[in-house]
Image (cartoon, helix red, strand yellow):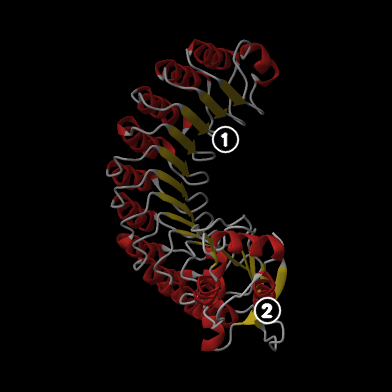
Amino acid sequence: GSLTEIAAKFIEEFTTEDGFDGEGCGAALSKMFDVEIGMIEDEAALMSALSQLANKGEECVKPAATVSVNMLGRSFEVPLETETSVRDFKATIAAMQAVPVYEQELTIKGKYAELRNCDKVQPGSALILRLRTKLEMNGQDAVDFLDKCPEAITTVERMCLDFHGAQLPDSALLRTLAAWTHLKHLDIDLSNKNVGVKGCSALAAALRGMDQLQTLRLRLQCCGVNTDACLALGDGFRGLSSLTRLTLEVPANSMTTAGCAALAEAIGRIVQLRVLSLHVGGNQLSPKSCGALASGLKGLGQLDDLTLHLGGNTISHTGCAALAVALADLHVENLRLHLAGCELGIAGCKALAEGLSHNETVTGLELGLARNSIQDAACCALAEALEGMVKLRTVVLDLNANAMKDTGCAAVGAALRSLPDLEGASVFCIGNPAAPKLAVHMQGVPSL
């Protein structure tokens, strides 16, 4: 909104039967911006005061890290290099949260960093902190930046740290997160950085103090995460007493069965979890890893949405059988299980089908079973399991690069047609002998 619209709102709010309350209006502005304004005699004085406040900070020397705020239709900047500047910034944020009549856009931009809330911030709602780095950013720049912010931006509940393409942020950067104990939503992408044990330990130390955290997403692809790093991360999960949504992406690392077991045990203690997505594909997991995962899942009685990415590990039919036992006892509504290239074979697929056949709660199912030497007998077992899952509404089956022929494909199609509440299904069988006749076998099955 314009200054005129802002002024009109203040005049409306502070106009009584006895006339305009200039003292009340001045006091409100003083409290809002933490400056002494005095009595506002009339609309002209109010416009003058608002204009001065909107341009506050324009004459400041701009250091490497500044706060650029677009408010009241104007843009101004506040440096973040002194305690006074941080107090000014805190007052500015308070003012922005208090005034309901204009769109708020907050951007912190410096030589290397950017802070932005991309959505329209309504009064009383949280700002969103997003720190993205460029190629030339180093860890110390980010440490300095984050060290100055927690006291100033106490309304931030969401933080997104994306270090894609940046130089390696050192463990000191991750330790600075410990000051952000008021966060409710945290998303960190450290993919393709050599985080290792030291970085995971620092991250875990920060997480232990975030008892208000409700949503956590950690992306650690190709980060040198080994068994000791998994033990450290698992230790960090122990204090997350408010967490209900967890996404942990740790593919293409050197995680072993022992590391997977440590993570599974820690996750299993977050008993209030409702949504879990675990991506550990392309590691060094064995069939015993699935047993550890199954044990961890047993403790998650409130879980209603589960995603497991285990592709590229040597799970074999033994590990699949252990997972199947856990799947039979889960009461989730949405299940996504990706086991591409896990050497399941016919026995593994049949074990999976057996576990699914006992699940009576799943409404959305996604199975990734590509490259597992699956033949007609296994497909028929899977089809029989699908027929028993009568609550299914959506189904996605990836059976690419197997050995399924027409008999198996026809059985899957018949099973899908038998589901009374099915709203849509997608079946992929590229690289199978049955592929040319897929459309025929899926006739009558609603597509997604």
Give, as a three-letter code, the residue at label 2: Gln
**Picture quadrant where residue 43 is located:** bottom right
User: Relative to residue 102, is residue 343 depicted above or below?
Assistant: above
Q: Earlier in the sequence, mark 1 or mark 2?
A: 2
| Marking on residue 266 | none
Task: Mark 1 vs mark 2: give the one in front.
Answer: 2
The residue labelled by disc 1 is 371
Density class for disc 2 (Cα within 10 Å; few <14, some 14-19, many ≥20) is: few
Measured from the top left, where is residue 20 in percent x and y?
Answer: 57, 66
Q: Which residue lies at the image location 70% right of the left edge and 89% below the top edge?
A: 61
Q: Is residue 161 visible?
A: no
Q: Amino acid at mark 1?
A: Arg
Give me the residue at 44% from left, 76% from top. Answer: 175
Residue located farthest toward the front when viewing the structure as drawn? 18
Q: Secondary structure at mark 2?
A: helix
Which one is nearer the viewer's eye here, 205 or 87?
Answer: 87
In the displayed structure, would residue 361 be above or below residue 114?
above
In the rendered image, which quarter is residue 129 located in? bottom right
Distance CA(mark 1)–CA(mark 2): 67 Å
Rendered location of residue 444, percent (x, y)? 61, 10
Find numbered disc 1 in the image and state the secondary structure of the residue it sits on: loop
Task: Judge whether 191 appears above or below 35 on screen.
Answer: above
Pick the residue in front: 87 or 130: 87
Residue 273 is situated, as x and y percent measured from the top left of the image, at: 35, 47
Which residue in the structure is indicated by mark 2? 52
Query: Mark 1: few, some, or many residues within 10 Å (few <14, many ≥20)?
Result: many
